[in-house]
Amino acid sequence: MTKDEESALIERVLAGDANAFEPLVLEHQTNVYRLALRLMGNEADAADAAQDAFVKAYTSLSSFRGDSRFSVWLYRLTNNVCIDALRRRRDTVPLETVDSEGEETELPLPDERWSPEILAERAEDIRAVRAAMAALPPDCREILALREIGALSYEELSSALGLELGTVRSRLSRARKRLADELMKSGNYTPAPHVKQQEGGARR
């Protein structure tokens, strides 16, 4: 589906034609689910998150400005839905409970991956990346979002953007370098040091 075709469908939805949203769902449902699965870690939660993402996309479609492809906006929205769901998942449980026979039994400790401290660190990282992404040129921002957030393959990127595979690879490489430069300027990224070689040849 081209960007113009997406724009026409969005205009119809905003004009009151709810049925025009279905082709957008069919076009993007596989990639939205795949992104949700990568973030949520299981099929049931991924399916719920994908459904929530499309519902939110429909109800907030008027906020889509059209300065990027609809898919980029949709993947970013899906990412936010998943992050919210993961925050809710970290709710703590009692260390002891009563089983079906009335015996007290100890439950596993909450998963520390969803502790407030870890989530705060992740939220800070997300804010830093978003700020760096916002500073990139539109073509860099678009291909990074489709690749890193949407998890599109090189072939899918080629199809979505109408570019040759070689152009996709070079543009993605350039976009990643620009993003790293922006993160370094803000102090949120330090490149790994290069292994220095001794004069006269490589180390053995």
Image: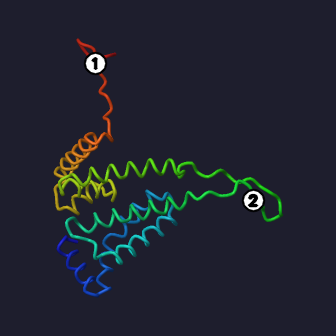
Residue closest to the eye, 34 or 7: 7
Q: Mark 1 points at which residue?
A: 197
Mark sitting earlier along the chain (1/2):
2
- Mark in front: 1 vs 2: 2
What's the coloring here? rainbow
Q: Quadrant of the C terminus?
A: top left
Vertical arrangement, residue 79 with respect to residue 24, above or below: above
x 50%, y 59%: residue: 87
Label 1's element?
Answer: loop
Q: Is residue 158 above or below residue 21?
A: above
Which image quarter: residue 52?
A: bottom left
User: Camera-side residue: 188 or 191?
Assistant: 188
Tag 2 residue: 97
**Element under disc 2:** strand
Measure the alpha-carbon separation of dots 1 and 2.
Answer: 59 Å
- Residue sitting farthest toward the bottom: 16
Q: Which residue is drawn at 33% across and 63% down?
A: 75
Quarter of the image holding residue 78?
A: bottom left
| Number of residue marks | 2
Seen at 42% across and 62% down, the residue is 36
Three-letter amino acid code of the residue under disc 2? Thr
Residue 85, position as x, y percentages in the image: 49, 63
Name the one closer to the observer, 174 or 113. 113
Q: What residue type is labelled 1?
A: Gln
